[in-house]
Amino acid sequence: QSALTQPPSASGSPGQSVTISCTGTSSDLNHYNYVSWYQRHPGKAPKLMIYEVNKRPSGVPDRFSGSRSGNTASLTVSGLQAEDEADYYCSSYTGNNILIFGGGTKLTVL
Amino acid sequence: QVVESGGGLVQSGGSLRLSCAASGFNFRSYSMQWVRQSPGKGLEWVSFISGSGSPVLYADSVRGRFSLSRDNAKKSLYLQMNNLRVDDTAVYYCARDPGGWAFDYWGQGTLVTVSS
């Protein structure tokens, strides 16, 4: 099973919105609702930001939102803040009892 | 929280046993998983175990070499890694799965280095 495809980098200025894409296939992203997004600051453990495509865990700001269209899931960060600068990873259950991750996107706040 | 231990330096073909100690939640009620990150690379799913201990699932890259188990009385998870390869070198994370293949609590990770 191949990894999900994410752009290596994304950027935006404070206050702006940025969207990070995560592309899979009809066998994974478009077939199951088990799509998650994680934020990873250097030296820290990943933090769950979105689960089941578009649900936010308690404590995650509503500036973070998830969506899906066909074989592509997206994470949108609105009202960018300096602390949003981090690596972001998507994941999807594929069936066949396997989970795959995207390669990660480095978000830079300009 | 979850805390991993047991990482270290091992030669190719060797074995290591990673442990994950959980606290602060009803351990037996949650599936647990392992995820790893190799140097300079992204996250890779390794293994899943349900709250009862069955089923246990593995990534193709480790199936047949790694074995995951849990002791709910001790609130602990164990990843036995045999026949280690250089490409198993990574930081290994233990994570709680509340359902839906999402990980809401992660440990800080334990580093496994496999030398040739």
Image (tube, grey):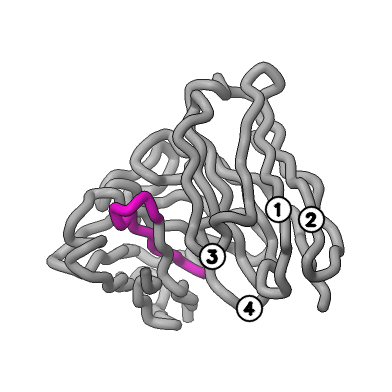
Q: Chain of mark 4?
A: B
> For mark 2, what is the residue?
B15
| B101 displayed left or right of A106 | left
Residue at numbered disc 3: B61
Residue B20 in picture, x, y percent from top left: 70, 38
Does the CB distance between marks 4 and 1 fall below 8 Å? Answer: no
Look at the numbered disc 4 and give the secondary structure of its residue. loop
Q: Quadrant of the N terminus of chain A?
A: bottom left
Residue type indicated by callout 4:
Gly
Dot 1: within a 10 Å radius of its alpha carbon, few (fewer than 14), some, or many (20 or more) residues? many
The residue that disc 4 covers is: B40
Residue A52 percent coordinates (x, y): 28, 47
Magenta-colored stretch includes residue B31: no
The answer to whether one can see residue A19 in this image is no
Q: Chain of mark 3?
A: B
Residue at image point 14% right, 65% down: A69
